[in-house]
Amino acid sequence: MSSIPPLRLGVNVDHVATLRNARDGASPDPVRAALLAIEAGADGITAHLREDRRHIRDEDMARLKAEISKPLNFEMAATADMLRISLATRPHAVCLVPERREELTTEGGLDVIGQREALAPFIARLNDAGIRVSLFIAADPVQIEMAAKLKAPVIELHTGAWCDAISDAHDSKAELEWNRIVEGAKLAKAAGLEVHAGHGLDYKTAQTIAALPQIVELNIGYFMMGEALFVGLAQTVRDMRAAMDRGRKTLQAYL
Ligand code: PXP
């Protein structure tokens, strides 16, 4: 058997900024959280600059880029303003996410079919700038095929519906969503895409999804920041890493 592909952990620091903005001061600082997460074993940092700047702000993105030693994954909507900021920031990666209803599929990912004409030049600009583009999409075969046609090198599979079904103990829905993710990851890899996953993951779901050999990166935020209140961020990163490593050891089942 070939060796086990590594699984990277991208820590999303958006909600450190959510907390900071509640009092509109400088603390807690998302850059400090990013540095601590990296020290504790994160392979990269993810932050979402929303159009309404509800958590991460422009200066946070600039500071993250300047101060962290690991790859920065800049999540954003596909707008002209965001394109300008991302080209100026030059992160390692950009993940295009939906922010408005018309950009969304019913499963919650970016509608790359409906948006294909707007996305094609956008992806090309980022590719030309040497920024790795990822499209945050549902594990829907037609969306995955379109992502490959649009020449995005990476997709991030939206795990929200699966995670919600698990936390609601809705077993048949959880199984359906899980099977979609398994098949979607296989299809995407076969189409030449690098496959990431994220949204709503916790220790249990991260351990489960770590068993899929096609997936090479998980981006996780909200759960980890909540856990960090109780055990600290460094411990949370180490516990998440351990959960992913346990899951990765069981990946033979999906090879
Ligand atoms: N990946 C993408 C593309 C996202 O938009 C988000 C949420 O900002 C995440 C991962 C992380 O999701 P969560 O905060 O639920 O772990």
Image (spheres, rainbow, N blue to C red):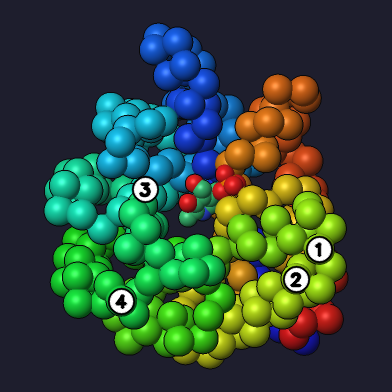
Residue 55 in view of the camera: yes
In percent of width and height, residue 185 lies at 60, 79
In percent of width and height, residue 127 lies at 24, 68
Of the two numbered discs 3 and 4 on the same chain, state the one appearing first in sequence: 3
Viewer-nearest residue: 197 or 93: 197
Q: Which residue is mark 4?
A: 114
Q: Which residue is mark 1?
A: 170
Q: Which residue is mark 2?
A: 173
User: Mark 2–mark 1 contact, CB under 8 Å?
Assistant: yes
Q: Is residue 80 left or right of residue 144?
A: left
In percent of width and height, residue 43 lies at 56, 48
Amino acid type of disc 4? Gly
Q: CA distance from mark 1 to mark 4?
A: 30 Å
Q: Residues within 10 Å of mark 2 (few under 14, many from 20)?
A: some
Amino acid type of disc 1? His
Where does the N terminus fall, quadrant-wise? Answer: bottom right
Q: Residue at x 55, y 64 (%)?
A: 158
Secondary structure beneath dot 3 equals strand
Q: CA distance from mark 1 to mark 3?
A: 33 Å
Q: CA distance from mark 3 to mark 2?
A: 31 Å
User: Mark 1–mark 4 contact, CB under 8 Å?
Assistant: no
Q: Which mark is residue 74?
A: 3
Amino acid type of disc 3? Phe
Q: Residue at x 42, y 19 (%)?
A: 21
Of the two numbered discs 3 and 2 on the same chain, state the one appearing first in sequence: 3
